[in-house]
Image: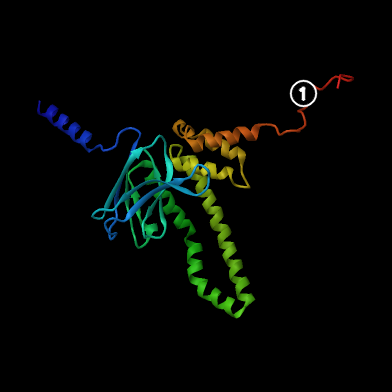
Amino acid sequence: MKKLILLLSATVVLISCNKVGKGEYLISGTAKGIANGKTIILQTQDPSGNGLKSTDTVKVKDGKFEIKGKITEPQFYMLQVESVNGKIPFILENGEVTIAVNKDSINKSKISGTYSNDEFVKFNEELVKIQKTLVDFQKKNTPEMNKAQQTKDTAVINKLMKEFSKIQETVGAESKKKYMSYAETHPKSFISVLIIQGMQNSPDLDAAKAEKLYAGLDESLKNTKPGKAIKAKLDQAKMPSVGATAPVGAAQPAAGSAK
């Protein structure tokens, strides 16, 4: 009997702690050092493709803010804080997202709380490691490059540019490899959908690879807007272009037929 009571009590606690219902989101934010009354703006890509549109605004109160609403599928969003440079990118989806705003360095703001956002944070951390050599080179050689540009020392400028291009090429290849391996191993992550969609916009698109990655996605992701857009492009690529030569063996007009 005692075990049953304890089990029921635990169930009540779990239900009471669940602040978000099906198809809802809750952004619980902290904004340390940001004055009361400052505006927090929730933004996403405008459907027309012309920049971002604001979908909600709230005011900071005692270093905290909260935004609640409904959402049908994961979407990429931005959080803009009044009087703070930069935006905080994250994935808005069903569940509670926690965002700790770092007003002094917006890129160091902390995001957690849902599967896609936890994956987004880990993925970005791994990309930062890959790109570290490029960042380190820039920090180390910027003073020398500035001096060379002022003195018009083309020998030094060309040398640094050549070294930078070589590192950039290596980092680019490693980053691409990371994108591909992630999409292959994370079929339930919304990030994988965004990666495949990005592949389709690349001039060196590997169509067969994109189709294979899409086929491996979880069905829930295939039914999102970017998932449907990927499928539409894959289908379009398979359609013969206007004026294309008919395949061998296809029926041809009979000789002397009416024109």
Q: Is residue 38 left or right of 208 when viewed as pictured?
A: left
Q: Is residue 77 left or right of 31 when viewed as pictured?
A: right
Residue 194 locus on image (x, y percent): 49, 43
Q: Is residue 16 left or right of 162 when viewed as pictured?
A: left
- Vertical placement of residue 101 versus 238, above or below: below
Residue 62 locus on image (x, y percent): 23, 55
Q: Residue at x 48, y 66 (%)?
A: 136
- Vertical placement of residue 249 versus 10, above or below: above
User: If the image is split into quadrants, where does the N terminus sit?
Assistant: top left
Q: How many marks?
A: 1
Query: Residue 18 sits in which quadrant?
Result: top left
**Which residue is the site of mark 1?**
250
Q: Residue furthest left?
A: 2
Q: Residue at x 61, y 32 (%)?
A: 235
Q: Nearer the viewer, residue 215 or 117?
A: 117
The answer to whether residue 85 of the structure is visible from this angle is: yes
Query: Residue 205 sits in which quadrant?
Result: top right
- Vertical placement of residue 256 versus 87, above or below: above
Residue 99 locus on image (x, y percent): 32, 50
User: If the image is split into quadrants, where does the C terminus sit?
Assistant: top right
Residue 180 locus on image (x, y percent): 52, 45
